[in-house]
Amino acid sequence: MVDISKSIPKVDLFEKTSGEAMYVSDFSYDDLHYARTLRSTEPKAKIKEIQFPTIPEGVFIVDYKDIPGKNVVKIIFDDQEIFPTDTVTYIGQPILLFVGKDKELLEELIKNTKVVYEILDPVFAWTNSAVHNHFSKGKPEEAFQKASRIIQYHYDTSYQEQAYIEPQGFIGTYDDGKVTLIGSIQCPYYVKNALLLALDAKGDEVRVIQATVGGAFGGKEEFPSLMACQLAVALRKIKKPIKMIYEREEDMISTTKRHPSKTLLSAAIGSNDEILAIRSNIGIDGGANIGLSGVVLSRAMIATTGAYTIENIDSSGDVFLTNTVPNGAFRGFGAPQMLYAIEMFIEHIAKDLGKDPFEYRMKYLAKQGDATSTNGKFRDPIIMPEMIEKALEISKFKEKSKIFSRPNVMKGIGMSWFLHGCGFTGSGESTHINALVKLHKTAEENVEILIAAVDMGQGVRTTMRKLVSSILEIPMEKVIYDFPDTDKVPDSGPTVASRTMMIVGGLVARCAKHLKETWTPGEMLLEERYVQPSYILWDEETMTGDAYPAYSWGVNVVEVSVDKVTYEVTVEEIWSVYDLGKAIDERIVIGQADGGIVQGVAYGYLEVMNHKSGKLLQKNFTDYIIPTSMDTPKMTTVIIDNPYPLGPYGAKGVGELTLVGGAPAVAKAIEMAIGKKVFSIPVTPEKIMELMKHE
Amino acid sequence: MSNITFKLNGEMVSVEGNPGVRLLDVLRNEFKLTGIKEGCGEGECGACAVLLDHKIVNSCSVVLANVDGHEIMTIEGFKNSKKYQIIRDSFGHAGAVQCGFCTPGMVIATESLLNENPSPTEDEIKIGMSGNLCRCTGYQSIIEAVKRASEDGDGLW
């Protein structure tokens, strides 16, 4: 049998290189109208009046009064209005739509529309807690009481923008009472369910179809539901085809980003310099509404001790509401903020205690059978020692550390260890999602995969077909996997949380095995629904138990040099070792690894986004700088198999794992290069200059 | 309004219209050449790249008037060439295509680079491709793809 990891050609290679692939902006219809958005220019204000210019015939205004159903975007926490009724809460917030056939005319009308505001006091400080969570493990209070020393540091992170190259967009039609949307989305059913509520519609009155997606990274998880609701309301009103594609600037100023965070970590140190307990307190900036922020917070808190086992933990956290753009899903989903903090902290503890950080960290590395941060259990084998050994060997970490630690070398090497929980946090998979997949064998003996999983570049159109073809031992050409269409596929859940191959693929694999066993000529339809393994127990209230069914693990090593004069950081080389269970396609996994680490490292040193009084200071790729080919170092990735029994062929999650360790690795490397402790990312030349001032 | 004539993918075409409109809009809307993508509208991302007299330009930053009497090649025209096949296959081998939104622009950038320098070094590839943003791949596979295209297409450029 051929090893499933052996790479095969991607099924969408030809259509994508030739420009034939249809992204949402490439669709068109007769009598096409466009929607453009009037946006708030105030961080918090009451709308007293809107003064419109003369509206020509054929141009429509669509606002909250046109919403047939509930004026709320259904996400997890439904606190966002589709169109504001009377109050705006962030700059860039959509107020209403102008719809018409002439885009330039619409722009002109928007320019000549005056919103009269009654300015309210905006909140930018992190004082208004909307979600507070807490959990503990062991007896942290006692440990802190008997500590011989307490070490405590603050760690900050700022915004990161997903910066998918394809901006957000939808195109929609209205036909005989039915609204159909084609969109650049990760979660067809999130969109559909949001539309049902907004339109007060029945299931068959709304249809959502995925177009080819030009990158997402979490940015097309929950945000598109807002846009889709607005467009659907317009479609119901005007009953003409409407296209709504964001321009880069409005995309950047108004769509969700990675939550800025502030984390306070404290360690109770015993008389033998051992860590008795760790206390974490994290605050994240939710922006103007909660949305997914509570879930992001959970994942961050659960990552409190990263890849280590600490007996006693106390973790608390808050989502703060501010009058800024709402933050949301982004590859890693809260974990990058905390993993960066804990990785720096353990290093800083070791340094303060005069210990070798590597040896010190090794003492606490999690082992199979250990209790997780939330008192669950690491059930499956953990092969981190082997992975770390490999990383040391290929990067020459120890030899380089010795040389780089000398003064004035201005070079550094940093190593991060991390894990990522695969699938939804806690009982999400069983209670919220309850995934259903189907396989349809046609009369022609083709097998159609019916799932809602979206290929946004991560290659699932290839890997899912490969999986089914391999199990059924039929050619790839006999396996069909069209773009998800809610009229055709069941709800297998959103394409998020590193769940697609492990959870959805796991169900598809079981369904395929069942199909193989019962294979009879002619048409067949089989289904498989997610069942939480009975040993996975989670208490949402106290945040205790198994937060995830399985974990992927990783080691990143980053080497940098820092310019002695400008403090500009150059990433010289990157080495990564991963345990992701089993790669379903090695080349595709390496692609995820390369892209993930570059995005993660850039989060740590390069990508700067901030706001001033609620106004984002970066609006396009001219001022929000993401890596170019010039910033790409040589990257080496090693994958070590460690099959997970419930994953298809042993596969676990991949997508997020490859990002979450990047920032701490590069921050530690810079720390070594400059000989100063780093507490804030991105570590820009300006921040290095500040640190160097305090000699 | 004026009449702008240029060669588009090998054929002479005339456009009656505002000479100040973006070439990107003309190509996508009038000629339905949707392989050209709009990523940023500010000439930063390269998703809308086309060849103007065999050299890469961002079609969002070129106005229609500027192509009068010139030659434009888009991915739709270029895909019929042997060079395209070499580039496509090298992108496939290297795993350089993920979401694909930047890919037609990357292909055009590769063609433009190899036209100028058939055997670029790794540094020359990095510089040559630096006008095209990709958020998925981290570029290593794209750099490898260009290198491979230059080797496999030896003699074509």
Image (cartoon, rainbow, N blue to C red):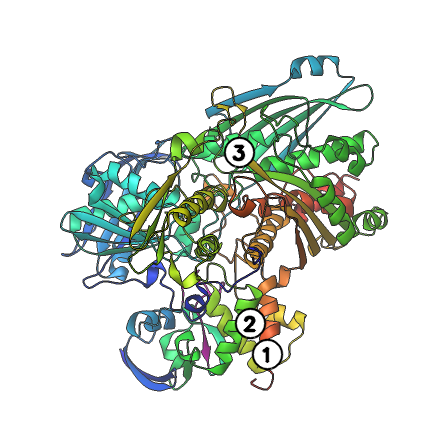
Amino acid type of disc 1? Asp
Which is more toward the observer, A285 or A364?
A364
Magenta stretch: residue A312 in it?
no
Magenta stretch: residue B44 in it?
yes
Rounded to the nearest whole Å, what is the CA distance between mark 2 and mark 1?
8 Å
Q: Chain of mark 2?
A: B
User: How packed is label 1: few (under 14 Cα within 10 Å), some, or many (20 or more)?
Assistant: some
Q: Is residue A314 left or right of residue A476?
A: right
Report the residue marked by disc 3.
Answer: A549
Q: Visible in this render: residue B64?
A: yes
Q: What's drawn in magenta, residue-wise?
A: B37-52
Up-down: is A546 above or below A245? above
Amino acid type of disc 3? Pro
Depth check, mark 1 against mark 3: the one in front is: 3
Report the residue marked by disc 2.
Answer: B90
Up-down: is B149 above or below A553? below
Rounded to the nearest whole Å, what is the CA distance between mark 1 and mark 3?
46 Å
Which is more toward the observer, A407 or B112?
B112
Q: Is residue A621 left or right of residue A683?
A: left
Same-chain status of marks 2 and 3: no
Report the residue marked by disc 1.
Answer: B152
Quadrant where the image shows the C terminus of chain A: top right
